[in-house]
Image: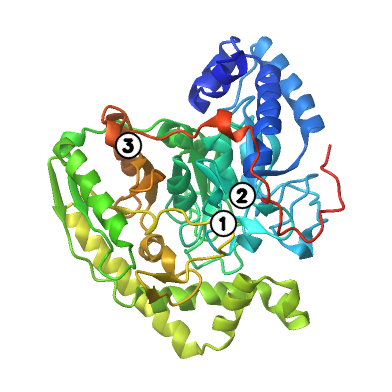
Amino acid sequence: MSANDEVLSKTAVELRRLIGSKELSPVELLEACIERIAQINPAVNAVTATCYDRARKEAKAAETAAQQGEALGILHGLPTGIKDLEETGGLLTTFGSQLYRDYVPAHDSAMVARVRAAGAIVIGKTNVPEFGAGANSRNVVWGATGNPFNPLLNAGGSSGGSAVALACDMLPVCTGSDTGGSLRIPGAMNGVIGFRPSPGLVPVERRGLGWTPISVVGPMGRTVADACQLLAAQAAMDDCDPLSYPVNPVEFAVPPQCDLGSLRVAYTEDFGICPVDKPIRKVLRDKIAAMRHLFRSCDEVEFDFKEADRCFDVIRAANYVAKYRDAYEKDPSTLGPNVRANYEIGAKMSLADMAGAHVEETRIFRRFQQTFRDYDVVLAPTTPVSPFPWSQLYLAEMDGKPLNNYYHWLALTYVITLATNPAIAVPCGVDHKGMPFGLQVVGRFRGDRALLGAAHAMEQAFEGIESLRRPRPDLTRLMQPTPALKSIVTHPPTVAAAH
């Protein structure tokens, strides 16, 4: 193992401690990250636009601040990737869309500004599907992101680039967001943490329908503690988001203690309605058998989500109509197939459809909360299948049965989106094909801290159980790039990375 490998394999929490104790220079850490990106990114295509010159200046300033004993932010000196749905001042921000292939914002979004204020050094953007639509991080601007365990397979999305950058130790900190599962699914597919916080905990500036809670911004990390560290920088009350509420971010900086032996655990294969591949059902049952002794109780529970698919269709589509109407009416061909599909579903809907969906979402919320009268957390698979080739835009059928639309295969996560409970994907060994398996852990309403504590305790316990331990990709193999990850690019951006 080289000196860089030893540094980059450390958690973000440990790296921040070493910077604070003057045992590690932010300049040294940044250069190690840049070298790792050069070595491995050609194989997985996770990092897109970069700003190395600016990052080097900021790393030098961070080094000076640490040496002089100045007050340091919680992310001080940590190289950071920003999901390419967030505006980042002076840095190419494309949203994975040909409409924005040359767009360089003048200012950071509110979330990016908070992360940078906490001392993070933005090094570049991470890849996404076009406008975040779907769970396959590929677009015509940057191409496809490959799974580090097999670059020909899907890395998930829409925070796929962030998850892969973390899994490959390219960056210690990466941001993400989640509507139908976009933090949880790539976390699960790449063996890292993806945490969907309660709506309003991390303000969302770019949500057009500000009172609709399905879209959130949140942290990813290689560990739960790393995700907590980033969350402490992201969480705030901000008047850009009407759902935000007063919080003390420091409370999220470290996961609270949790005694697994006191937890009452419920689990389900499918929440009663979600399509799930038969082998994944068996994988979940095997994982539950390997972990149930850790808990006070562990019971299979039935759920009533029967109208969730239609409900999510309507609420999701309304958001797309609000955001992409002008572009669609001007020229539908400028939008990709997933975005067009969402818009067209919404354009056909009536006021009665909208009212019915919101009534049903309220029912779903109330029914689901009753579960937590008897249980502390709910466990389920995060994804219903093992990762499929990224060249397949989405999953069209399962077990020989056609799925409703391009995102129906994400039902395991979007039913929880509708319930609004916080949820986290925790690495849990591998599936039947040797690919990472992510356990979705759902907490009670507004129970973010307790959920993070439970997930942290589970993560620690899983490390001692071979079948549940977090898998790691073979980084040496990734230094031999797999071709064709950029094959769907129509033409590259014309604006160079900002300095």
Sequence order check: which comes first, mark 1 or mark 3? 1
| Circle 3: element type | helix
Sequence order check: which comes first, mark 3 or mark 2? 2
Q: CB under 8 Å between callouts 1 and 2?
A: yes
Residue type indicated by callout 3: Gly
Quarter of the image where the C terminus is located: top right
| Disc 1 residue crowd, few under 14, some 14–19, many 20+, Cα 10 Å | many
**Which residue is nearer to you in this view: 48 or 231?**
48
Give the residue number, with chain letter if any, for mark 1: 390
Q: Is residue 150 above or below residue 65?
A: below
Give the residue number, with chain letter if any, for mark 3: 453
Residue type indicated by callout 2: Thr
Residue 352, label in figure:
none
Q: Is residue 237 above or below residue 70?
A: below
Percent x, y for residue 459?
Answer: 33, 34
Q: Residue at left 53%, top 56%?
A: 389
Q: CB under 8 Å between callouts 1 and 3?
A: no
Snapshot quadrant of residue 467: top left
**Which residue is nearer to you in this view: 55 or 286?**
286
Give the residue number, with chain letter if any, for mark 2: 145
